[in-house]
Image (tube, rainbow, N blue to C red):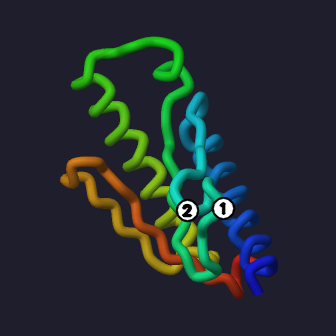
Amino acid sequence: MMEEMQQVKSLLIQKLTQMVEKLIPNYFVEVYGSHATGLCLHWSDIDLVVGSVSERDQAQSLKMQELKIKDSLKKISDGLKSEIASGWVILVNYIDMASVPVIKVKCSLKELML
């Protein structure tokens, strides 16, 4: 079961990465947490971080980074919400007031595999 779920999760990560690359060019998506370390269980959520390629290479003011991050996450959130009609995305919750802004996404594995 773990191997089957890993294939589905890999497909989901690929789909989300492609969406980010399309919506906000020059940004990257990386897996972290239990999936990155290989310590995940078949029901574990997938933690992804999205960042600017240029931020990897140069330091920017914290306020500028925060504004860019929130704007980029809003674009991703809106893009995911537009996918609800296609069925593979069920719910999108963008929490921009958290100390670290986050997008929580619930997906349909059944629809993802179609």
Image quadrant for the N terminus? bottom right
Residue 45 screen position, x and y as percent: 52, 71
Image quadrant for the C terminus? bottom right
Q: CA distance from mark 1 to mark 2?
A: 6 Å
Q: Amino acid at mark 1?
A: Gly
Residue 8 screen position, x and y as percent: 74, 74
Q: Are the residues tagged 1 and 2 within 8 Å (C-beta)?
A: yes
| Secondary element type, mark 2 | helix
In this rendering, the answer to whether 11 lies above or below 109 is above
Q: Quadrant of residue 30?
A: top right
Q: Amino acid at mark 2?
A: Ser
Residue at the location (66% across, 61% down)? 38
Residue at the location (50% across, 43% down)? 50
| Secondary element type, mark 1 | loop
In this rendering, the count of numbered labels is 2
In this rendering, the answer to whether 43 lies above or below 57 is below
Q: Which residue corresponds to mark 2?
A: 34
Q: Which residue corresponds to mark 1?
A: 38
In this rendering, position of residue 63 left or right of residue 29: left
Q: Quadrant of residue 7?
A: bottom right
